[in-house]
Image (cartoon, rainbow, N blue to C red):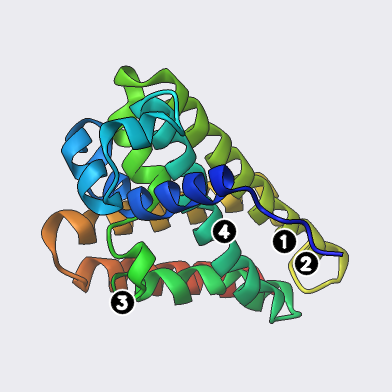
Amino acid sequence: MTLSVSKSERTRRFIIERTAPVFNTKGYAGTSLTDLTHVTGLTKGGLYGNFENKDAIAVAAFDYNFGKVTAYLKDKINAKDNAVERLLTYPEVYRNFLRIPFLKSGCPILNTASEADDTHPQLKEKAAAALAFWKQAVKNQVKRGIGRKEIRPDVHPVQTAVVLMALVEGAVLQAKTTGRTAELHMAMDFLEKFIKGLAV
């Protein structure tokens, strides 16, 4: 039995899908109502008939962007069995993030956190929750690897997660800011060595 989706829900989904890349590229402050009406083809009334305000659209767009990145990484990670190989998915994906259409504008966590720090508490909260989710996912992979004797028992799961995330986000920031990939590749080479060094 298939559940039918209401017209209202379809419209909300359409708005989120169309506006998500704009928010991730321009940021919350840089995205205007004109941008939103332009990409959706809807009037202001059409947008606000489905969402309370721009804030509500931005929060839904963040969830959509983060969900897309998470699903992409999860598919690639789950395709591998060994814990070290699973962790190597991160440098493998982010080394070429500029070639992945929905990552081209950067990491939604980094983009949102850097802008929403003091200006948008709800988005800041969303970014913090996304970071916590990512950290937990990496910790789980490390613990799984230790349990399966694929990762050394002296490896610290939290430290590993913090270092991995810092290298990825720092490298993405440099690549986005400079338009160069040299530093990105250096950082991902370093991350690869770091992850391989966790192996038993």
Per the image, the residue denoted by label 3 is: 99
Kindly identify the amino acid type of the residue bearing the numbered disc 4. Thr
Q: Is residue 175 above or below residue 137?
A: below
**Along the polypeptide, which appears first: circle 1 or circle 4?**
4
Asked if the residue under mark 4 is in contact with the one under mark 3, i.e. CB atoms within 8 Å, the reply is: no
Kindly identify the amino acid type of the residue bearing the numbered disc 1. Gln
The residue drawn where x is 86% and y is 70% is 148
- Figure quadrant of residue 104: bottom left
Asked if the residue under mark 1 is in contact with the one under mark 2, i.e. CB atoms within 8 Å, the reply is: yes
Label 2, residues with CA under 10 Å away: few <14, some 14-19, many ≥20: many
Per the image, the residue denoted by label 4 is: 70
Kindly identify the amino acid type of the residue bearing the numbered disc 3. Arg
Q: Which mark is residue 145?
A: 2
| In the foreground, 191 or 47 | 47
Per the image, the residue denoted by label 1 is: 141
Q: Is residue 186 above or below residue 122?
A: below
**Along the polypeptide, which appears first: circle 4 or circle 2?**
4
- Figure quadrant of residue 111: top left
The residue drawn where x is 50% and y is 26% is 125
